[in-house]
Image (tube, rainbow, N blue to C red):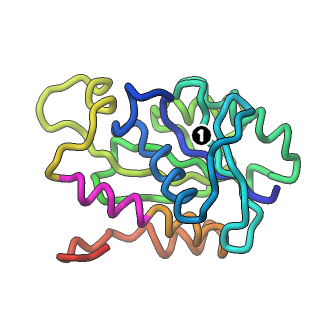
Amino acid sequence: MERLVVGLGNPGPRYAGTRHNVGFEVVSALADAEGIPLGEQGFHSLYGSGMIAGQSTALLLPQTFMNDSGRAVRAALGAWPGVAPSRSLLVVYDDLDLPVGRIRLRPSGRAGGQRGMESIIVALGGEDFARLRFGIGRPVAPEPIRDWVLSPFEPSVEGEAQRTIDRAVEAIRHWLSHGIESAMDQYNRTHPMAPGHG
């Protein structure tokens, strides 16, 4: 295995379709587009593998619950020693500090309060791995953050959220083909909101 793409979320139907599960949704959309079933069980995860953009790639959905995602990622990396985190791992997760419609790729960095990322950083002993942050925005009205992230996107932004999932899939393919710096240059720009764009 040459590359590992991990989508963060919580397992089970209760959490399906929530903002906190967009990492699952992005990686599942990539799997569907590439014809890769995510039916294998192992590493405390569901996963599948295949060739994407010319790279032998595993797609992983940890089933540990968000706060313990690091256990799954560490187990997978232990089984695939060819995947070096600093050049071959990408983690996809939700970000409160980006608005809906924005994604941002980075080669490394802190968790920014995202519990799944905190778990992975602790499990791997460092922050030196690529990540794709998917904007979910913050609540406008007073609402506990937990309730916000564990609820679905409101109907007014559902379409934009889906277009952003599609764009995130493109960004992952670009990362696989060209690396993180090129993907950042291409996809970190503000996404135009032109009618019909997507």
* Residue at 16% in and 48% down: 155
Task: Indicate the position of residue 44 as horizontal and vertical percent values.
Answer: 69, 28
Is 182 or 15 nearer to us in this picture? 15
Q: Residue 124: x percent and y percent?
A: 73, 35
Question: Residue 160's quadrant in the figure?
Answer: bottom left
Q: In the depicted view, which residue is nearer to us: 66 or 87?
A: 66
* Residue at 27% in and 24% down: 147
Check if residue 165 falls in the magenta segment: yes
**SS assignment for the magenta stretch, majority:** helix
Residue at the limit of the structure toward the left, as seen here = 141
What residue range appears in magenta?
157-167
Quarter-wise, where is residue 36 in the image? bottom right
Which residue ends up furthest to the right in the rendered image?
81
**Please, what secondary structure does the residue beneath circle 1 have?**
strand
Please determine whether, in this image, residue 191 is positioned above or below residue 147: below
Q: Which is nearer the eye, 195 or 86?
A: 195
Q: Is residue 126 left or right of residue 141?
A: right
Q: Is residue 167 left or right of residue 190?
A: right
Residue in the image at 62% along x and 46% along y? 38
State whether residue 27 appears in this view: yes
Disc 1 target residue: 61
Relative image position of residue 141 (x, y in whole percent): 11, 32
Number of disc labels: 1
Image quadrant in which the N terminus is located: bottom right
Residue 186 lies, with reference to residue 88, above or below; the image says: below
| Label 1: how many Cα within 10 Å (few below 14, some 14–19, many 20+) | many
| Residue 125 seen by the camera | no
Residue 25: within the magenta? no
